[in-house]
Amino acid sequence: MRAASGTRLRRVLAWAVVAAAAPIITATAMAGDASVPPASGPPLHEDLVPAGRSLEERLAEIQRRIQTAALYPPIARARNESGEARIAFEIDPEGRPVKIHVARSSGSTTLDRAAARAVEGAAPLPHLLGEINVPVRFELSDPE
């Protein structure tokens, strides 16, 4: 058993050496071959920065759309209820919010439900990976 595992380890190490050397060998071969055109496109460091709006800009847009879609429930207004609900959710690739839930209650189930509806009503949203948590504010000074 020990001999078999030693042989396997040597094979794995041999493949690791080949894999590590492959880019060097390829780059050296290409540098000497005039028939291979040089790589075109942006430098590698630019590839690391995603194209389009920044994360902060997308989060601000999401929050703006949700707050705009929030409708103050008349019953909450009549009861003088106000507050801020934090709604957590994910955004699927088509921009639809999924897995919507109240992360922190406003203290009013009516306002919490209205905040969750605002998230649904704000779609389509800019796509982000992972769960985000957005405040939805309901203040009595808001126009109806």
Image (cartoon, rainbow, N blue to C red):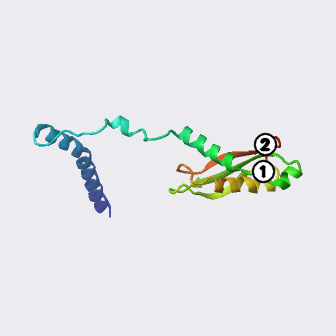
- Residue 59 % position (x, y): 58, 42
Q: State which quarter of the image contains the N terminus.
A: bottom left
- Residue at coordinates 36% horizontally, 35% vertically from top-left? 45
Give the residue type at disc 2: Asp
Query: Which residue is the extreme one toward the bottom?
Result: 1
The crowd level at tag 1 (other Cα within 10 Å; few <14, some 14-19, many 20+) is many
- Residue 53 % position (x, y): 49, 40
Q: Is residue 5 above or below residue 85?
A: below
Q: Is residue 26 above or below residue 119?
A: above
Quarter of the figure with residue 27 = top left
Find disc 1 in the rendering and name its residue.
72
Give the residue type at disc 1: Tyr
- Residue 34 % position (x, y): 10, 39
Residue placed most toward the observer, 27 or 12: 27
- Residue at coordinates 63% horizontally, 52% vertically from top-left? 122
Disc assigned to residue 142: 2
Query: Which residue is the extreme one toward the right?
Result: 79
Q: Secondary structure at mark 2?
A: loop
